[in-house]
Every structure is written in C-alpha cells, then in structure tokens.
Amino acid sequence: MVYLIYKEEICYGYYLSLNCYIVRSTYEDGKFTAELKLTSENYMADENGTCTNYEKGSAITIYACKSDGTCKEVGNNWYNENVTLEIRYPDGSTFQEENATYEWKTNQGINYDTATVATNVAENNAITLPYTVNVTYLKDAENVIATVSKNVKIDMQPPEILETIIKDEATWTNTEKEITIRVTDYNGSGVYGIYVGDKDCSSLTIEDFEKLNDNKYITTKNNGTYNVCLRDNAGNQSAGGLIIGMLKMSI
C-alpha cells in the first residue's frame, strides 16, 4: 500500500489557494487502484481537496486535579498545593483511547510513563514546572502521537511582611497616625491583598482583603492593636499576622 500526496496551487488574482489530495494506491490482482482519502477518515483533505491543518497536541490537553476533587485545565493560574496531572480531551472529557502509552518529561531530569503524574513540591516553596507529555495510541488502525506542553505553577509559600513603619512613632498626637507596610511574596504568585483590622487571619475570606497593586500599603489608624494579614494569588494566607502596638497619641 502506497500513500501519495498531491498538492495543487491555484492562483486567483492576488490570492493563492493550496489544495491537498491524499491518494491511497493499492496493488491487487495485478493492477493498481487509487482512492482519495477524506478528512472524515482522519486524513488531511476534504472532498474538495481543501487542506486541513493538524497541530501536534491539539487532540489532548493537561488537567490538574486538587485534593478536593476539582479538576481544571492547566493555564496561567497558580496552585497552593500539589496536584495530580492527567490527560483529557480539549472539551474536558476523559481521555479513553485504548492501549495508549505515555511519556511525561520534566526539566528535573525525571520522566514518567504513567497515565497520571503527581507533583512533588516541598512545603514553603514556589516553583514553575514545565511538563511535556507524548501520548501514542491507535486510531482507525493508524498510530497517532499527540503532544502537549504546560507550565504547572505551584506556590505553597505564604507572603510575608518585610517592614512596618509608623510615621512619627516617637511623637505624641491626638489624630490618626500613618502606617506604611511593605510586603513580598518573593518568587511566588504575588501578593493579592492585605487586611488590617481586628479579625483573626485564619478566619478571613478573599472578600476581606484589600487588593494591592504593588507591594506597599499605606493607611491611617487610631490608637489600638491590629492584625496585619496577607493573601497571595495562589490563595496562601499569612498564618498569624503582625500586631501593631499601641500608637503613641496625646489625649
């Protein structure tokens, strides 16, 4: 059996049309027979000879599943825990090709041949892990190799307070004092927001945080004690918070 690929270039004014014809030629009983293969049969031309583009990896994608059972396609988002990676079709349905083999590659010198892979990032670390997987399976008696690459971003390190500055801390006043708080998430997902108040940090939800556009927060407060709590874009929240002591003020 011989496959012949014919390409026909037809010019229409300033436009160039590239047509593809995939012909299967079979020798049987002393003669050749030829058959045009169509896209519906998983080849690369339709009945009009129009080319169809096949991009390697377009048939599969990578999903990340968290410990709560939720699974989403890996994109530009961050995870605050280790996840299990699995192959799915682009519409999110389960990959069900029989006799499929898997070849996962990482930049850590570790390869896997399993259908799923669990990340193994240590606590208090933030890292971007590039994964490439080649999946080989049979489709209509033909070997298909699909490839997809994704960056899996895991941040398990809570943001931290670098510095708290109370303006004119040593002087007495009968008005509010200005407080500047500098924060960082180092190489992680970035600081999402800050909370300064009397709630315990562990009880806060994302709605309690005031979003930060940079790593500096300026506010004014009356005499009192306040918890300073941070949240990053991966969902990590500072565990304890900083207590700002009694502000020196005149009565």
Image (cartoon, rainbow, N blue to C red):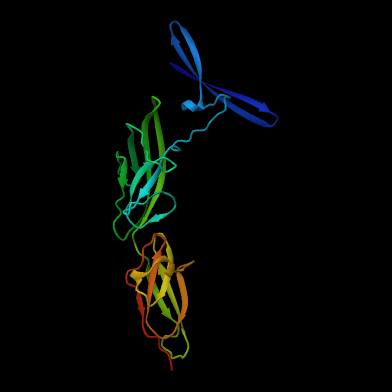
- Position of residue 217 relative to residue 106, above or below, is below
90 displayed left or right of 119: right
- Pinpoint residue 212: horizontal percent, then vertical percent: 47, 68
Front residue of 70/161: it is 70
- Pinpoint residue 94: horizontal percent, then vertical percent: 37, 40
| Label tally | 0
Tell me what residue is drawn at x 46 percent, y 73 percent.
217
Q: Quadrant of the C terminus?
A: bottom left
Q: Is residue 4 visible?
A: yes
- Pinpoint residue 85: horizontal percent, then vertical percent: 34, 46
Residue that extends furthest to the top in the rendered view of this protein: 30
Q: Quadrant of the N terminus?
A: top left
> Would you identify the image quadrant in which residue 183 lies?
bottom left
Tell me what residue is drawn at x 39 percent, y 63 percent.
186
Residue that extends furthest to the bottom in the rendered view of this protein: 251
44 displayed left or right of 233: right
Q: Is residue 43 visible?
A: no
- Position of residue 174 relative to residue 38, above or below, is below
Residue that extends furthest to the right in the rendered view of this protein: 13
- Pinpoint residue 156: horizontal percent, then vertical percent: 33, 59
Front residue of 227/180: it is 227
Front residue of 48/229: it is 48
- Position of residue 75 relative to residue 147, above or below, is below
Tell me what residue is drawn at x 45 percent, y 38 percent.
58
